[in-house]
Image (cartoon, rainbow, N blue to C red):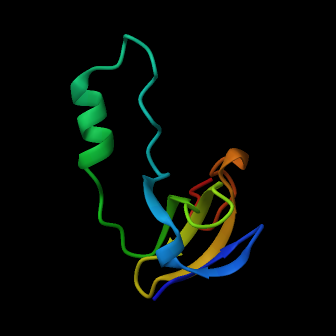
Amino acid sequence: MIQIPCPWCGPRNEEEFSYGGSAEAPMPALDSQSTHGDWHAHVHVRENPKGPHREYWHHTAGCERWLLVCRDTRDNAILECRDASSGPEGLPGDEA
């Protein structure tokens, strides 16, 4: 079981959270320029990375905040967890 260290609630079991998808690829624009194909690719076509991966998680059974989590997919270790509004820059696995 994965323990996610919510910045507001402390460490909690993953059962309290809903997976929100990868934070690696930018979301298509919320305007008429985005196509169904853009959204299909964003939601359904994913990499299967080995190592640090940035993801969105929603603390549905807790504070109800969106979190940005960097999880190592090799062993599910949580490398960092913070409020999603801060953006993915600077998390472990960042190429910059």
Residue 3: x and y, percent?
A: 57, 84
Q: Count the labels in the image.
A: 0
Q: Quadrant of residue 82?
A: bottom right
What is the residue that sits farthest to the top in this orientation? 32
Q: Give the residue at x 26% y 39%.
A: 41
Residue 95, relative to residue 74: is it above or below? above
Name the one closer to the observer, 52 or 31.
31
Q: Quadrant of residue 58?
A: bottom right
Residue placed furthest toward the front: 61
Residue 15 coordinates in the image, percent (x, y): 47, 76
Vertical placement of residue 71 versus 67, above or below: below
The relative height of residue 28 versus residue 92 in the rendered view (above or below) is above
Q: Where does residue 50 sit, x and y in percent of width and height?
A: 37, 74
Q: Nearer the viewer, residue 45 or 5?
A: 5
State the image coordinates of residue 4 (x, y, percent, origin top left). Answer: 60, 77
Q: Residue at x 34, y 19 (%)?
A: 34
Residue depicted at x 44% and y 88%: 75
Residue lying at 41% horizontally and 29% vertically, measured from the top left: 28
Q: Which quadrant is home to the N terminus?
A: bottom left
Q: Is residue 82 left or right of residue 25?
A: right
Q: Residue furthest right?
A: 8
In this rendering, would 26 be left or right of 47? right
Residue 70 vs 35, above or below: the answer is below
